[in-house]
Image: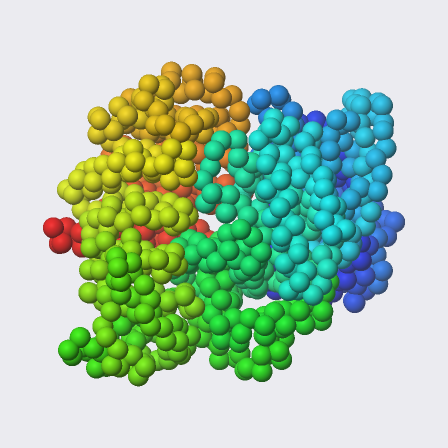
Amino acid sequence: MAGNLTRDEARERARLLKVESYEVALDLTEGEERFESVTTVRFTSSRPGASTFIDLHGAHVRQVTLNGEDLDVSAYDAGKGRFPLPSVAASNELRVDADCSYMRTGEGLHRFVDPVDQKVYLHSQFETADAHRMYACFDQPDLKATFQLTVLAPADWEVVSNAAASGVEELAEEGGRHGAAHAARRWQFPPTAAISTYITALVAGPYHKVTSEHDGIPLGIYCRASLAEHLDADNILEVTRQGFDFFHQVFGVRYPFGKYDQCFVPEFNAGAMENAGCVTFLEDYVFRSRVTDAVVERRAETILHEMAHMWFGDLVTMRWWDDLWLNESFATYMSVLAQSEATRWGKGAWTTFANVEKAWAYRQDQLPSTHPIAADIPDMQAVEVNFDGITYAKGASVLKQLVAYVGLDNFLAGVRDYFAEHAWGNTELKDLLEALERTSGRDLSSWSKEWLETSWVNTLRPSFEVSDGRFTGFEVLQEAPAEHPTLRSHRVAIGLYSLVDGALKRTKRVELDVVGARTSVAELVGEEQPDLVLLNDDDLTYAKIRLDERSMRTLVDGGIAAFTDSLPRALCWSAAWDMTRDGEMSTRDYVKLVVSGAGTVTDITVLQAVLRQARMAVQQYADPSWRPEGLALLAGELRSLLGSAAPGSDHQLAFLQAFAPVATSEADLDLLGAILDGSEVPVGLSVDADLRWTLTHALVSGGRLGEADIDAELERDPTATGERSAALCRAAVPTAEAKAAAWERVVGGKLANHIARTTINGFQDPHHPELLAPYREKYFAEVGRIYREWTFDQASTFAVGCFPALLIEPETVKAAEDYLAAEQPPQALRRLVLEGADGVGRALRNREKDAASA
């Protein structure tokens, strides 16, 4: 995000201007630092003579011509990324001739050099407002226009944009502005339909490509040449075809952008980006080593998420970033629906949703920075921190609740009406609600106020009386904290589960509306008390659930392994984790629950999530005096499960991946070393490049390997992934000197985005928090400067990643409070620091709970 455009400025500019077209000519043959960018914009104004500005960041501006007259280039405000337009006419043609900067931060036009073959790769990332790092534009979502691109590129490059190229001209030797001559090709792209600037795109370089076609739509898949052997194009294309068939069926509008390219690009900052017809993905989704099916499932969800955006976000776009959730929540919900209805993951996709997306939402919604789903976004800095668990996962969970409320058929009918009415336009929340009200016949104003315009998550508890083994009364209690007192209307199912022939089966289900603080459930009176009562069975609503004492005892005594269905098991795991985070269940009891039940979890996504949570619990929430015992307990069970897992299975790999970060004993580190050197490899396990780095990292952290070993491993794997992994390991060396060197590399600000992130991850090693003690003071001394001077993505990476989160002491919370009081930082930075301090405060409370339970 370059300039900090405010909502008021955007509204004023939208009232003044209507943008018709952009013609952008780029020369990518000019050097390693900058590229030539010439933009011609045609637009009209409702108030001739008014002044406005066009966005352009980090550029050297040579010439600006408005309606045939040169403007003074010294008026360019490089700091704000704006060029003033002092007096616009009713109809205008603006030409901006500039040199723009390549980025290494994952924003704007990012430039990467492959260490394997030294080939150069470019990709754009413009959300939320970084298109004006590549070309001059009115960079806000409601000023849509057609976009026509011409690119001069080296002769061996592929160039991909929103439309299919209309022509490629071979230029044997092309003399650039700076006198160099290059073998080059000029790529011409036709005008797009009217789209927002943030979804325009450019991907360029000697990419490997695979082409196909489905239902008349040309399909392309791109990755770096050095990754071509690992590209599993068949699986990607299968999910792509399934997605198009499903969305064509339910949306009632054909895919609107002609061709559909999916580009896996290096050093991408997010999971993916929904550029119209040219989707970019994190290149980690090209699996160079073996992964579990949970990772393949996650990639499929991401593919479907971005595809859903082609309709919801690209065809119909939010007017301003207040309604970012309309984009992201809708795409998240629809991607899981598509997975469950059209792919091999079936209903298990909702199990993953319950255990992954909703866990993210619950965590985010209980931070001091929580906000309504329909957020108040006064400027671009505010929106950058709102790509969070509320905007994506809580919003999708609430849409799932809405579907239960209005019915899926009515919901999809409303969505079809919405697309038909608003195609190629911009909308607000009320536009979607009006469409859904028409098709469902329900008034959604109160629903919107409850669910979209308030914050925090409710807690639901069962309350009942039993006589002679049967319920004589049953209520659902709903709770909300005093700071966020809203009690919502929930559509929930209640399941009664009993052990029958060793299996935990549902014997009764009731569905009802829970309203207010207490809701009686007359249907359960007279029913026999089961072994387990599960509120929110089938995961219909968005709420934390609590388990009564008997139900929890059933789980801890092994019942969690006895479920015959994956979704109720996942909901119980989620409830136990919520109770642990909220201090209602001790860390040691949660770890013991995981140890007793992990070996029977068949769903690999749930298994890996539960194991991650258990590791976090023992490392951060456990009483420090019990922590070594907890690590040994978890490591011992994982080592046992690794030994008994089916050779070559996903579970075998998952158990080793979970075992390595908790291996601290001499015997456990011996085993990791033996697997790495090949002397004791479990049957069926392939110790490939990524697994070698996992083992190396654990052994470096454990003090068994050092710099020379890291160098040797990098020589074995001299790839981009190898470089990142080596950076991770160097920062994890458990010495004060290694930590100091890692800190200096990070705060120097010269690391590329992915190297910076992995260095920070290695620096924050949970096994050696004592080495981080000097950096609490240093963090608060640096974070303000870094936030002012760096790009937002890099600055937020530092603010979150380097927060002294592992110094779980009251002094850390006080240091954060003192910094905020003294410095009064910008609101976005304030939010990130508050979230870090809240995490430390929660860990302190949970450590007290765990100590008290000893």
Which residue is drawn at the image coordinates 44% and 54% (left, top)? Answer: 352
- Horizontal side, residue 468 vs residue 385: left or right: left
The residue at the point 52 percent across, 79 percent down is: 445
Relative image position of residue 710 (x, y in whole percent): 40, 20
Closest to the observer, 824 or 40: 40
What residue is drawn where x is 58% and y is 79%?
Answer: 440
Horizontal side of 731 relative to 503 (left or right) equals right
Q: Position of residue 329 (x, y in %)?
A: 53, 61
Res 185 → quadrant: top right
Judging depth in this view, the residue of 611 and 829 nearest the camera is: 611
Q: Nearer the viewer, residue 609 or 315?
A: 609
Task: Name the residue located 42 percent from the left edge and 69 percent from the top edge.
Answer: 541
Q: Residue pushed farthest front?
A: 501
Q: Position of residue 360 (x, y in %)?
A: 41, 55
Colour logic: rainbow
Q: Position of residue 286 (x, y in %)?
A: 56, 36
In the image, residue 347 above or below residue 666: below
On the rendered structure, is 97 left or right of 572? Answer: right
